[in-house]
Amino acid sequence: MQFHLIHTEVPSLSLKKISDTPLVNTENLPQTYTLKISVFADKDNQKIFGVLFSLSLEHHQEFILEVEYLAWFENNKDLTDEDLNSSFAYINAPAIAFPYLRSFISLVTLNSGFRPAILPTTNFVKMYEDSKKRVKV
């Protein structure tokens, strides 16, 4: 399987301010987030697939951000169901697209007047293995 990232887009974005008072010391306030990933084929082109990141983030009791971030990849051959359900699609493709999502989150929060939210690195191997364990139970 040879593929490359061809395009990213943001189908959905919500950014809500929680507090009207600027927070001076946020060191002890948590940044909590949930991240879900889904993979699907393009209905018009069997060589293209998408990786959808669904992220919900609360940044130090300052704002809540919810975003759907979509990364499109093109493969050198038609994709099978096996390809779309493989560890490759759920580990390698998200690992390639995730830095773009991280950058987007930092820039949109900074440009909205907040301190930038910086997502931590993510272990997609562990996410994939954990999802497989949940399915088997």
Image: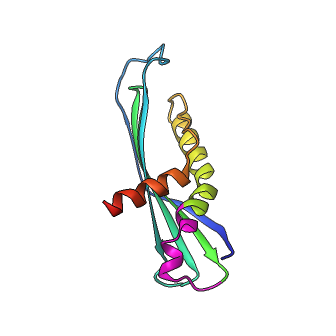
Residue farthest to the top, as pictured: 24
Residue 9 place in picture, x, y as percent: 53, 60
Q: Residue at x 38, y 26 (%)?
A: 61
Highlighted magenta segment, given as a residue range: 77-90
As displayed, is residue 89 above or below residue 46? above
Quadrant housing residue 5? bottom right
Q: What's the colour scheme?
A: rainbow
Is 74 in front, or is 130? 130
Quadrant housing residue 28? top left
Q: Residue at x 51, y 69 (%)?
A: 50
As displayed, is residue 92 above or below residue 82? above
Residue farthest to the front, as pictured: 137
Q: Dividing the image into 4 quarters, which one contains the C terminus? A: bottom left
Q: Is residue 86 magenta?
A: yes
Residue 67 place in picture, x, y as percent: 43, 50
Q: Residue at x 58, y 42 (%)?
A: 121
Residue 71 place in picture, x, y as percent: 55, 63
Q: Dividing the image into 4 quarters, which one contains the N terminus? A: bottom right
Is 95 in front, or is 103? 95
| Number of numbered discs overlaid on the protein picture | 0
Q: Is residue 124 magenta?
A: no
Residue 68 place in picture, x, y as percent: 44, 55
In this rendering, would 18 be left or right of 85? Answer: left
Q: Residue at x 60, y 57 (%)?
A: 97
Is 74 in front, or is 82? 82
As displayed, is residue 82 above or below residue 25? below
Quadrant housing residue 32? top left
